[in-house]
Amino acid sequence: MPLAPDTIAEIERIRAALPNTRSALLPALKAAQREQGWLPRETMAEVAERLDLDPNAAYMLATFYTMLHTEPVGHYHLEVCRSLPCYLLGCDAVIEALKERLGVELGEVSADGLFSVQIGECLGDCPHAPMMRVNDDYVGPLAPDTIGELLEILRARAGERVRGLAADPADGPPPNEGPLHYSNAIDARPLSTVRE
Ligand code: FES
């Protein structure tokens, strides 16, 4: 699917703001992913072409960074850290709880399209281990027995706005969508796993 005019304009802004097109490649790919949810080969090629770069440069970058997705992901992509501090504090039990509750294996998308789960390396937030990234937000410390609560909060936020099923773009942004931080954005229903 070709990029939308707004995304193309954003890529042009990024290109103009950075000293060379190779520097613009990562933010341009992120802009394309924001629009399409993931990065099909033809999308990577279009981004590269708009920056006068080889399509392989986009592919190599997209397959290096876990925040870029070269396969479809859920509306909420859950990247659970499995580096040492998170491992020692029980990330494997969290991963198993997610897989069981969502009925997915790693790398799969849940049947409702809402969730996908992936293992990642240290996300730089070890004091909140075990933790994970939920799209662009960090959540932790996690515990297997409260994972269900977190998933329900995310389901409530998504409402009917699962990608591809949005009722009408003219409705505007999702009413409950917002940053998901440890204890502020979800303070109406604080997670019992959250520590100050
Ligand atoms: S080890 Fe998990 S965030 Fe650093």
Image (spheres, grey):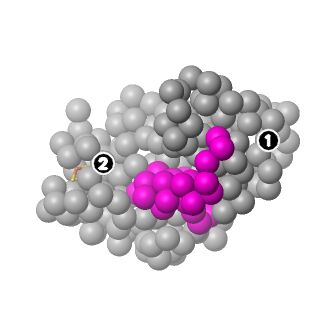
Chain-order first, disc 1 or disc 2: 1
Name the residue rendered at 27%, 69% in the picture: 92
Give left or right: position of 143 versus 36: left
Circle 1 is placed at which residue position? 4
- Image coordinates of residue 17 in percent, x first then y, are 56, 23
Label 1 crowd bin: few (<14), some (14–19), many (20+), radius 10 Å: few
Give left or right: position of 69 versus 95: right
Name the residue rendered at 62%, 24% in the picture: 16
Label 2 crowd bin: few (<14), some (14–19), many (20+), radius 10 Å: some
Name the residue rendered at 19%, 63% in the picture: 87
- Amino acid at the residue labelled 2: Leu
- Image coordinates of residue 91 in percent, x first then y, are 26, 63
Residue 4 location, quadrant = top right
Q: Which residues are magenta?
A: 51-79
Asked whether the viewer can see residue 18, the reply is yes
Mark 2 Cβ inside 8 Å of ligand 1: yes
Name the residue rendered at 59%, 66% in the picture: 71
Q: Which is more toward the observer, 99 or 152?
A: 99
Q: Which structural element holds mark 1? A: loop
Circle 2 is placed at which residue position? 123
**Residue 74 forms part of the magenta stretch:** yes
- Image coordinates of residue 5 in percent, x first then y, are 80, 36
Asked whether the viewer can see residue 142, the reply is no
Q: Which structural element holds mark 2? A: loop
Give left or right: position of 156 versus 149: right
Quarter that holds the C terminus: top left
